[in-house]
Image (spheres, rainbow, N blue to C red):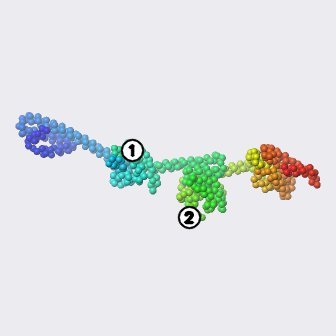
Amino acid sequence: MLLVALVVRAGLPLPLLLIAFMPLPLIAVQYPRMVYLACTLLAGMALILGMRITGTEPLDALLVGVLVTALAGGLFDRLARGLRAREAARGALSESEHRLRAALEANMDAFVIYRAVRTSNHAVVDFEILELNAAAARMLPLPRDGGKGARLRALAPHALHAELFYKYRRVLESGVPLEEEYATESVWEGSVWKYQQVVPLDDGVAVTARDVTGRKRAEQQLALAVHRAQALAQVARLSTEALNLEEIVTRAVQAVAEVADVDFGCLLTGRWDRVVAQACWRSPGAGPELEQLGSRMPYVAEMLQQALQGGWPLYWDDLLTHSEAAPGAQPAISGVCLFPLDPERALLFGRSGAVRPWSAEDRALLEVAAQNVRVMFERTTYLQGIEAAARRDPLTGLGNRRAFDEEATAEMARFGGSRQGNALGLMLMDLDGLKAVNDLEGHARGDALLQAFANALIAAVRTQDRVYRIGGDEFVVLMPNCMPEGGRRVAEAVRRAAADLRRAGFAPAGVSVGVAFCPSEADTLDHMMHLADERMYAEKRHRKQPVSAAGGTDQDRAGLDELLNS
């Protein structure tokens, strides 16, 4: 102030002084020593001016100059320090910003800063881009330099824009960050998965995003592989259960259809002219007409024969391209694959809807599943053969004593409590003359007699009757739903069959028959067998008793008639 007053009193213009001092702050930033020298020079000038104007003594002028120099030097030193600190901070900030931009550009994640677009009443209606890196420009996609200022509404389809907008607005208003994964659909790439992290700012949000499609697809493939392995394990476990062939097929197809692109499956049995679909399983969307493959698509029989003769799986992606398909027809299934199981049967998998090729993954899964089913088929068939052999007489092919005991017990349980006139007949027979044939003609001839008598029995009884060989020369017939009159007719047919054997060369052959019924005569199997055995031996005794030329006594003939009518 003293310096200004001196200048004004000396008549120097004040603007000129201000102009002279204006460069000093700028110079002070880079050259603080020059500012100090300038202040000293100004103080000397002020001293000289003061001496001239006031005529002051040199000592007083010197004191005034020292005071002015101290004040000016302190002022300019403080100013220089503040400017240097600000400039250093600005440089550090610029360096940090440069490093941050470089890091964002080098980062594979997309980074976008959105500013909220508000209406006059401060309601958020959209978000626009303030800053983005190259990865974000590629992901959105946007031109690298033209992305700033673009709005979210213009970047995303309507449905996705609405979803993202509400999420960003919720983060901005709540102040709670968001972390999620979401999927979008691409025409060329299918489902595209993205991970994003949204952080609230003062008036916007910062979004970090990355494409995680590769990881998600790898996870999906892993999960699918686990499900496929579980399905195959489920199919393999069927071998530990007591299932028939149809149950094996149905449950195997159902297990595979949960992870493979399959809508239908069945066991196909047939020859060139006819195909029968058994053990059918179909998805809820598949129609019941799939179970009539042979009648609706006759060319399936040809495909079955191709698979059976080749012994290899047969895949058909589009049945409309088959030469036997009717023009313009819409088959119930669009694609099939066949896996041979034995010379007459194959496992079929089918799909409906749009035509699509069988993928390598589905082929591998279906082939392993079919191989498991084939092994189970062979095992089940082998066990059934062993079971059948254990219940069958190897010489005659009739049921043996074990089969008779099991089936007769089951029939007794069914007919034992009947009160509606239904009856179970049991006919016990001895093949007479077998020992004589063995002794006179050899055991081979005796075996031939047994086989011939077994065939004659099968021809003599009714269709529903079951014939067994329970001992060396003992045979039994179970006659369900048979009344006594019907039993007598069957017994007479058996006796005529034995007479035919004698005419066929087995001269000693004959048969003794005893019949009993449940529940009218016996209520247990042992009781029925006892009654039939007594009647059979009574007939045997009558057959061996000598009869006169006139036909025997009246008592003998009456006894034989009673036996025949029993």
* Apparent side of residue 282 relative to residue 108 in the rendered image (left or right): right
Is the N terminus in the top left, top right, bottom left or bottom right quadrant?
top left
Residue 47 occupies quadrant? top left
Q: Which residue is drawn at 62% across and 59% down?
A: 293
Q: Residue 171 carries which label?
A: 1
Q: Which residue lies furthest to the front in this view?
A: 420
Front residue of 478 and 12:
478
Image x and y of residue 34, in percent: 17, 42
SS assignment at label 1: helix
**Of callouts 1 and 2, the N-terminal one:** 1
* Apparent side of residue 531 relative to residue 332 in the rendered image (left or right): right
Front residue of 60 and 266:
266
Residue carrying label 2: 328
Residue 83 occupies quadrant? top left
Is mark 1 in CB contact (under 8 Å) with mark 2? no
User: What is the three-letter code of the residue carrying label 1?
Assistant: Val
Residue 556 versus residue 504 in the image, above or below = above
User: Spatial distance from mark 1 to mark 2, Cα to Cα?
Assistant: 57 Å
Q: Residue at x 68, y 51 (%)?
A: 381
Bin the neighbour count of mark 1 within 10 Å (Cα to Cα): few under 14, some 14-19, many 20 and up. Answer: some
SS assignment at label 2: loop
* Apparent side of residue 232 relative to residue 101 in the rendered image (left or right): right
Image x and y of residue 184, in percent: 44, 52
Image x and y of residue 320, in percent: 56, 62
